[in-house]
Amino acid sequence: MHDGRHHASKRMMYDASMRTTVTLDPDVDARLRKLMRERGISFREAVNFAVRAGIPSGASAEPFRTPTSDLGGARVNLDKALQLAGSLEDEELVRKRDIGK
């Protein structure tokens, strides 16, 4: 059942018709107060500005794309790559145990 309340770590939000109560972390509050002083705006205007700046407006937002490169074919046989990685890890654990780490 949804009662209009959302809980997330230190942030709580209570929805009402035109007002919303938000508990801000101290660093966020300080940044909003600084924005208010610098721009001569109200707390409400500062919060709305910050929220709009942090939320993409939808269609105009470009989807994130990870650049890719063709690295060519494998230069070594990878059929037993996981076995090799396991052996190397085992050797490293034995080495650390032997030197007391």
Image: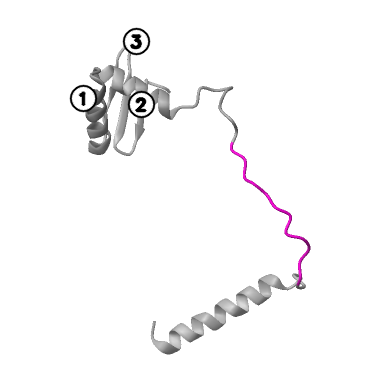
Q: In this picture, which residue range is highlighted in magenta?
A: 64-75
Q: Amino acid at mark 1?
A: Arg
Are the residues tagged 3 and 2 within 8 Å (C-beta)? no
Q: Which of disc 2 and disc 3 is earlier in sequence?
A: 3
Report the residue at 32% width, 10% height from top: 18
At 21% across and 25% down in the image, what residue appears?
37
Tell me the residue that label 3 is attached to. 17
Instruction: Please indicate whether residue 99 sits to the left or right of residue 71 in the image.
Output: left
Callout in the foreground (3, 2): 2
Q: Residues within 10 Å of mark 3 (few under 14, many from 20)?
A: few
Q: Residue at x 26, y 21 (%)?
A: 39
For label 3, the SS is loop
The residue that mark 1 highlights is: 37
**In which quadrant is the N terminus drawn?**
top left
Instruction: Tell me the element at label 2.
Output: helix
**Mark 2 sits on what residue?**
50
**Residue 70 magenta-highlighted:** yes
**Residue occupying image coordinates x 32% and y 14%:** 16
Judged from the image, the secondary structure of the residue bearing numbered disc 1 is helix
Across and down, in percent, residue 96 comes to 45, 83
Is residue 18 on the magenta stretch? no
Labels 1 and 2 touching (C-beta < 8 A): no
Q: Nearer the viewer, mark 1 or mark 2?
A: 1
- Give x and y (percent) for residue 8: 35, 35
**Nearer the observer, disc 3 or disc 1?**
1
- The residue furthest bottom is 98
